[in-house]
């Protein structure tokens, strides 16, 4: 069942605006909705005209919202990793773990993992309390990285698991040949091996997130009537196709904002498309968000969800 919705697109196309409008429209139709901002530069609270933090806050009847506290998730991810390493390796004292983790905080990929584990937390702990979860995403580069992490890291962890199995098999051979070998003191069976167990649990978590993105998410890409946002939408589509994540709809936002010529690429033209006019009076209130008119997209989403059930 697709009960999670992501709005993707180039910076400034209207991701926060349309995800807020969509969440409000669903909530006002009687569904219980949680909207979550994954953008490190949060402005979901500005769009919804309320002050948000890392915990769900009720915006109005049926609608709660939160802004994921990314620095807190980065710290949590590093702290957990450090504790697991300490618990599993007795020789950690020889390594200077603290300085290692100090560097890791700023290393490429750390923020993407933090976003991923924050999504897992929302999905496992909060989503069961609501009918739908809507994600307001950061601009494309970070979004594509966290969407691709489960598939890519899953392959990597599978290889590490195989390597660990080989190590355990070799240990078993040594112990068989020489039962008094010091290797007999260490773990030889994968069902008792903490490292193998940890790799297995990471694989399961990644597989669950992969299923969430590829089978239970309705992903909509937003474009504006300009070529650059369409080029970006094509890149998003290609990357999602490579990851086996289906794209469900295209939202053309800010129709009428300029007279410049543009055309939709044929690679996107087969997707259901929804158009929203540029509002010259601006979008100042939650009622203005609802007035954008997201009912047809909501109907498509509910129809899609029933089909895929
Ligand atoms: N249909 C519309 N009519 C008028 N203004 C709009 C419309 N859609 C979005 N805007 C305005 O465009 C600006 C950018 O919108 P928004 O913040 O939703 O984009 P975004 O894709 O979330 O940006 P970012 O990539 O920075 O997160 C905002 O000022 C918003 O009010
Ligand atoms: Mg935004």
Image: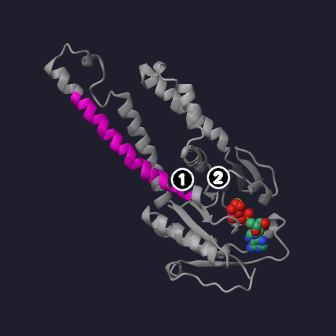
Q: Kindly identify the residue that appears in the image at 61 percent across and 47 percent down.
A: 126
Alpha carbons under labels 2 and 1: distance apart: 10 Å
Q: Main secondary structure of the magenta part?
A: helix
Question: Residue 38, which numbered label?
Answer: 2
Q: Considering only vertical position in the picture, is 52 above or below 80? A: below
Q: Is residue 202 left or right of residue 291?
A: left
Check residue 144 for magenta coloring.
Answer: yes
Characterize the local packing of mark 2: few (<14), some (14-19) or many (20 or more) Cα atoms within 10 angstroms. Answer: many
Q: In which quarter of the view is residue 264 placed?
A: bottom right
Total marks in image: 2
Characterize the local packing of mark 1: few (<14), some (14-19) or many (20 or more) Cα atoms within 10 angstroms. Answer: some
x then y, percent, for residue 32 = 66, 57
Q: Kindly identify the residue that appears in the image at 63 percent across and 72 percent down.
A: 229
Residue for badge 1:
146
Q: Is residue 160 left or right of residue 18?
A: left
Check residue 37 for magenta coloring.
Answer: no
Q: Considering only vertical position in the picture, is 153 above or below 254? A: above
Q: Earlier in the sequence, mark 2 or mark 1?
A: 2
Q: Kindly identify the residue that appears in the image at 57 percent across and 28 percent down.
A: 99
Of all residues shown, which one is farthest toward the left? 177
Residue 124 can be seen in this image = no
x then y, percent, for residue 210 = 46, 54
* Residue stretch in magenta: 143-170
Q: Kindly identify the residue that appears in the image at 59 percent across and 61 percent down.
A: 140
Q: Secondary structure at mark 1?
A: helix
Q: Find out whether the residues at labels 2 and 1 contact each other: C-beta distance under 8 Å.
A: yes
x then y, percent, for residue 208 = 45, 49
């Amino acid at each position: 069942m697709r009960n999670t919705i992501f709005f993707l697109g180039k910076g400034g196309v209207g991701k926060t605006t349309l995800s807020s409008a969509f969440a409000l429209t669903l909530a006002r139709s009687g569904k219980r909705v949680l909207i979550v901002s994954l953008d490190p530069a949060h402005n979901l609270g500005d769009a919804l005209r309320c002050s948000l933090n890392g915990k769900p806050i009720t915006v109005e009847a049926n609608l709660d919202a939160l802004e994921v506290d990314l620095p807190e998730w980065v710290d949590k991810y590093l702290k957990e990793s450090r504790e697991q390493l300490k618990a599993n390796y007795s020789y950690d004292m020889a390594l200077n773990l603290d300085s290692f983790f100090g560097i890791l905080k700023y290393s490429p990929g750390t923020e993407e993992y933090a976003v991923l584990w924050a999504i897992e937390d929302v999905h496992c702990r909060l989503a069961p309390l609501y009918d739908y979860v809507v994600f307001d995403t950061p601009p494309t580069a970070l979004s594509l990285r966290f969407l691709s992490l489960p598939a890519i890291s899953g392959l990597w962890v599978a290889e590490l698991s195989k390597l660990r199995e080989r190590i355990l098999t070799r240990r078993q051979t040594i112990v068989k040949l020489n039962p008094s070998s010091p290797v007999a003191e260490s773990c030889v069976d994968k069902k008792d091996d903490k490292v193998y167990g940890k790799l297995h649990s990471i694989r399961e978590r990644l597989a669950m997130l992969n299923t969430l993105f590829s089978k239970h998410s309705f992903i909509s890409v937003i474009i504006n009537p300009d070529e650059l946002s369409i080029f970006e939408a094509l890149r998003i589509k290609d990357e999602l196709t490579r990851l086996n994540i289906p794209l469900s709809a295209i939202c053309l936002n800010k129709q009428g904002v300029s007279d410049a010529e543009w055309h939709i690429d044929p690679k996107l033209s087969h997707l259901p498309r929804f158009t929203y006019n540029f509002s010259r009076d601006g979008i100042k209130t939650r009622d203005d968000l609802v007035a954008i008119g997201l009912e047809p997209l909501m109907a498509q989403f509910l129809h899609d969800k029933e089909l895929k059930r």
